[in-house]
Image: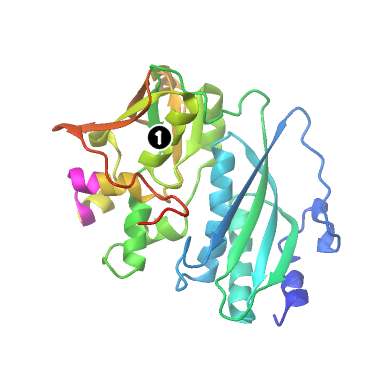
Amino acid sequence: MAGEADFIAALRGIARHPAARGLIDDAAVIAPPPGRDLVLTHDALVEGVHYLPSCPPRDVAWKLVAVNVSDLAAKGADPIGALMGYALTGDAGWDAEFVAGLGEACAHFALPLLGGDTVSLPPGAPRVLNLTAIGAAAPGAVPARSGAVAGDRLWVTGAIGDAGLGLRIALGELTGPASLLDAYRRPRPDVALGRLIAPHAHAMADISDGLLIDARRMADASGLAVDIDLDAVPLSREAIALAGSDRRARLAAATAGDDYVLLIAAPATIASICLPESAILVPVGRFAAGAGITLHDGGGAVPLPPRLGYEHGRLP
């Protein structure tokens, strides 16, 4: 895989959907599914920002796909295609491994690769990877971040903080189980769960930058206040075994980010909808009139940490 032509040739093994036209055109042609709304999202991964330079390229490809699919899941949308922007650095082995991981991720999430663009970077520049994902959802069942209603509960659909611990394992700061490292490198957003929940949610998003900051964004967008019960935040057994479950550990989990589970504003009645046996739906807070975010646990009010989560461009 010596250059752009070889890289695109390798991608043709993934891009088998008719809309991709064999990757010989500069555009893909796809018909919207009848009676469904199109949902489009775009995410980028930057080396040294979103993933470590030491991260295996197969895992980088997986994460590039997964973070975009997570946005589709948060809108109740099924994936129907993707366009990728890829920066070549002259490392043919890395490129080949990335393509292998991309094929694995696209197959897992049923996301056809339809096209995109390749560019080259100057020697030594960090890699920049982009993906635009296209989904389809039932009309009127695409919950916005801004739809929360006073009295709604705040729900999450998975453990919080595993990826944050996985990052610390990847950095060599901790020694822990492979499952936590996998949570950081290979998130697994649940599209089917998003599709089931979306018609019952007033607002929905995914947790990418941290539970606290993403909950505050939902509250701000909805013109409401949100209060979170730290004791209710679900932690995995592996996380508890490694880092504990006290207030400090829960604050670390709630601000770490990269969880890619759903964050939902909905009334208590959402707990009665039929979900797969493996799915969880945990209430962790409540929306009310007002503004901002507050925290509490069994010990009472909890002061807000200096950072609620990850924000691009914000200095420490």
Instruction: Left or right? Give the position of 119 relative to 219.
Output: right
Q: Position of residue 251 (x, y in %)?
A: 26, 45
**Residue shown at 81% from the left, 62% from the top:** 23
Furthest residue toward front: 315
Q: Amino acid at mark 1?
A: Arg
**Residue shown at 37% from the left, 41% from the top:** 211
Q: Which image quadrant for residue 14?
A: bottom right
**Residue shown at 45% from the left, 68% from the top:** 52
| Mark 1, secondary structure of its residue | helix
Q: Which image quadrant for residue 279?
A: top left
Q: Is residue 88 magenta?
A: no
* Foreground residue among 89 and 28: 89
**Residue shown at 36% from the left, 67% from the top:** 170
Instruction: Report whether residue 145 is seen.
Output: yes
What predominant SS class does the magenta segment belong to?
helix
* Foreground residue among 74 and 221: 221
> Quick one: quadrant of the N terminus?
bottom right
Q: Which image quadrant for residue 164?
A: bottom left
> Quick one: quadrant of the C terminus?
bottom left
Q: Position of residue 208 (x, y in %)?
A: 46, 47
Instruction: Left or right? Give the position of 1 relative to 147.
Output: right
The residue beneath circle 1 is: 216
Q: Position of residue 68 (x, y in %)?
A: 58, 49
Q: Position of residue 75 (x, y in %)?
A: 58, 34
Instruction: Left or right? Give the position of 61 relative to 316.
Output: right
Question: Within 10 angstroms of label 1, few (less than 14), some, or many (20 or more) residues?
Answer: many
Question: Magenta segment range?
Answer: 242-250
Instruction: Report whether residue 279 is seen.
Output: no
300 vs 58: above or below: above
The structure's colour scheme is rainbow
